[in-house]
Image (cartoon, rainbow, N blue to C red):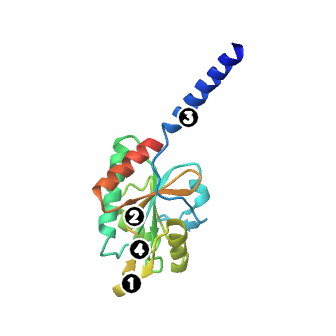
Amino acid sequence: MKKYTQRLFLSALLILAMILSACGSDIDSNMSEEMEDFSFINQDEEALALADLKGEWWISYFSYTECRTVCPRTTANMVNVQNELKEAGLTPRIISFNADPDHDNPEDLRLYAEENDVDLKSWDFLTGYDFETIQNLSEKSFNAVLESGAADQMAHSYMFYLINPQGDVVKKYDGMSKNELDVLIEDVKTVL
């Protein structure tokens, strides 16, 4: 009888552990890519490396100041995401990787942030690398194309990405879709 009670107790404990592990920070992921190591500079000419982001959840996307196609909309959408999360008391780090580093310097990025009402307390616009470096990061970490296009326009991802505390890209969201942005906001609320 004593062994039966012990087994029953251990089984109940195991079931409880499985239930608890299913709650909280679990989200449906659609990616599993390790972030390539990086160390770049932001709009304030301060260094920011992947190592600085370890241990926290963060959101990322690609943009550049002279973009006339998707960036005006994706940046505005990311501002909305930032504002909605702030209203919920959450301030995850947002990282914008610059798709045109040969053109955009830190001062350009700071002006771009101001023009778009970005709260730079938790948002960094990164540059300070060559095009091949960011192209490699885009392809290897985000499985996304980044290419020079016609009339100085870049072909780049319009997806938003959620990166876990271990530095893995775990989910992508359509940065142009209101429904996907709502999912991103709910996912961030779940993991934070």
In this rendering, would 80 be left or right of 21?
Answer: left
State how far apart marks 1 and 4 are (Cα).
9 Å
Q: Residues within 10 Å of mark 2 (few under 14, many from 20)?
A: some
- For the residue pair 14 and 107, the one nearer the viewer reads as 14
**Residues packed near mark 4 inside 10 Å, few (<14), some (14 to 19) or many (20 plus):** many
**What is the secondary structure assignment of the residue under circle 2?**
strand
Q: Is residue 12 visible?
A: yes
Residue at (31% x, 63% y) in the render: 176
Alpha carbons under labels 1 and 3: distance apart: 49 Å
Residue type (three-letter) at the residue carrying disc 1: Gly
What whole-number distance in Å separates the C-alpha atoms at marks 2 and 1? 18 Å
**According to the image, label 2 marks what residue?**
159
Residue type for callout 3: Met
Crowding at dot 3, Cα within 10 Å, few <14 / some 14-19 / many 20+, comes out as few
Q: Position of residue 34 (x, y in %)?
A: 58, 61
Q: Say the numbered circle drawn on residue 18.
A: 3
* Label placed on residue 149: 1
Q: Which residue is mark 4?
A: 156
